[in-house]
């Protein structure tokens, strides 16, 4: 588990005190199932969540720009052959969080193949 940060302190410019955008990354695993009968190749679905936070005054347009960058990065990553395959990805506007931040969220669903 990662280190818990005080967002109100860490995500501010040390000189001006202005809020700076930040992201929060999390990953969740889902169930696995055999890809073929009699084979020890197992596929499991995973979910990567990237929450984008920008100062509330910057709102949806700025959060969406960062969301587009995250989507482009994942699209580039999944072009490479490997044990991970992209299933879907989407950006969603979440809205103000009540603490001075506007939140957007990128959800990436992927298939992970494990060979035993």
Image (cartoon, rainbow, N blue to C red):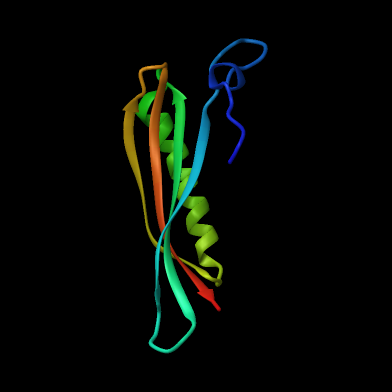
Relative to 50, is 80 on the left or the right?
right
Q: Position of residue 101 (x, y in %)?
A: 42, 21
Q: Position of residue 10 (x, y in %)?
A: 61, 21
- Quarter holding the C terminus? bottom right
Residue that protrudes farthest toward the right in the picture: 15
Along the line of sight, which residue is nearer the eye, 56 or 34? 34
Number of numbered labels in the structure image: 0
Residue 17, by quadrant, is top right
Give the residue displayed 46% in from the left and 29% down from the top.
53
Along the line of sight, which residue is nearer the eye, 67 or 7? 7
- Quarter holding the N terminus? top right
Residue 2, by quadrant, is top right
Q: Position of residue 4 (x, y in %)?
A: 58, 29
Give the residue displayed 44% in from the left and 72% down from the top.
43
Along the line of sight, which residue is nearer the eye, 66 or 23? 23
Give the residue displayed 36% in from the left and 23% down from the top.
97
Q: Position of residue 109 (x, y in %)?
A: 39, 57
Give the residue displayed 39% in from the left and 85% down from the top.
36
Compared to residue 25, the image places residue 57 above or below, namely: above
């Amino acid at each position: 588990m990662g280190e818990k940060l005080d967002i109100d302190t860490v995500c501010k410019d040390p000189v001006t005190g202005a809020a700076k955008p930040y992201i929060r990354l999390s990953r969740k695993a889902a169930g696995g199932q055999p890809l073929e009968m009699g084979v020890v190749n197992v596929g499991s679905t995973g979910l990567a969540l990237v929450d984008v936070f920008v100062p509330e005054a910057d709102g949806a347009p700025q959060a969406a720009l960062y969301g587009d960058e995250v989507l482009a990065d994942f699209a580039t990553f999944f072009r490479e052959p490997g044990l991970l395959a992209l299933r879907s990805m989407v950006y969603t506007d979440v809205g103000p969080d009540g603490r001075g931040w506007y939140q957007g969220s990128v959800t990436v669903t992927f298939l992970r193949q494990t060979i035993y």
